[in-house]
Amino acid sequence: MRKKVIAGNWKLNNDLNESLSLVSELKSKLPDLGLNEVIVCPPYTSLESVNAVIKDSPIKLGAQNMHEADSGAYTGEISAQMLKSVGCEYVILGHSERRTIFNESDELINLKVKKALSKQLQVIFCVGETLEERESGVTNKVVEEQVKKGLNEIPESEIKNIIIAYEPVWAIGTGKTATPGQAQEVHQFIRSLVRNYYSEVTAQNIIIQYGGSVKPDNASELLSQPDIDGALVGGACLKSDSFIQIIKAV
């Protein structure tokens, strides 16, 4: 049985003091996770300090993005090694906000995925369609292209270090959520893509999260679907009580 992985993407929220307060509350309220996993992804400025709080807990540390280069004249950017040096085990790549607001292409995201893996960072790799694409009936086509290009030249031996997060763009921060049936259908499709690109074993083992307005009142139904292996949570992870309720839903 695949473990469930719940990740909280704090986005552009929480200064250092707020970050420490939130993660301290989370740590004190965390239930027994069993074989499951919880990841928090604070802003860069809080990573090292948050890591100090969670180092003796089951909570893992992730970053929200990184640059594809090791070093150089890239003002304002952060490298994979920098993330490793402050305790990160995970990094989110390909989030829809990076794709749409910052114009990141599938090819650029693929370079980032390769770089992260080469530095022993595990990747939360995001894919998903816009509302226009869903209404046009091209969800599978869009998701297939993102998966195919994002995982281009990634060997099967490295897939165990990748979590795929299906995040329909129209459900992120909008209050709208894909129905459990809609989400399950795309998750099942993504698993079939991994099966076609790699193998049945890899397809059965890969973790596929759902993201898009996940809340305490819909988490249980979403997480009960056979191909949904966790959640990438946005707004609801900014309050310890709501995030804990989602964690308990597994």
Image (spheres, grey):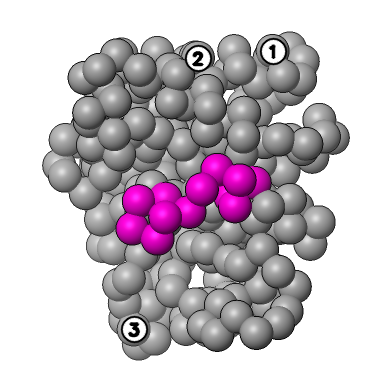
Residue bearing the label numbered 3:
15
**Type of amino acid at the residue the image marks with label 1:** Asn
Q: Give me the residue at 82% from left, 34% from top.
A: 155
**Type of amino acid at the residue the image marks with label 3:** Asp
Camera-nearest residue between 52 and 98: 98
Question: Is label 1 or label 3 in front?
Answer: 1
On whether residue 236 falls in the magenta region, the answer is no
Residue bearing the label numbered 2:
189
State the image quarter where residue 250 is shown: top left
Residue bearing the label numbered 1:
196
Q: Secondary structure at mark 2?
A: helix
Asked if labels 3 and 1 touch by Cβ distance under 8 angstroms, the answer is no
Above or below residue 137? Residue 145 is below
Point out residue 163 in the picture as x, y percentages from the top left corner.
59, 39
Camera-nearest residue between 189 and 184: 189
Camera-nearest residue between 224 and 70: 70
On whether residue 103 falls in the magenta region, the answer is yes
Asked whether the viewer can see residue 184, the reply is no
**Type of amino acid at the residue the image marks with label 2:** Phe
Magenta part of the protein: which range?
Answer: 99-110
Above or below residue 14? Residue 235 is above
Q: How many marks?
A: 3
Q: Give me the residue at 79% from left, 62% from top.
A: 119
Label 1 CA crowd tier, 10 Å (few <14, some 14–19, many 20+): few
Label 2 CA crowd tier, 10 Å (few <14, some 14–19, many 20+): some
Label 3 CA crowd tier, 10 Å (few <14, some 14–19, many 20+): few
Q: Give me the residue at 29% from left, 14% from top.
A: 137
Point out residue 67 in the picture as x, y percentages from the top left corner.
61, 67
Point out residue 229 in the picture as x, y percentages from the top left corner.
50, 30
Q: First in sequence, mark 1 or 2: give its number.
A: 2
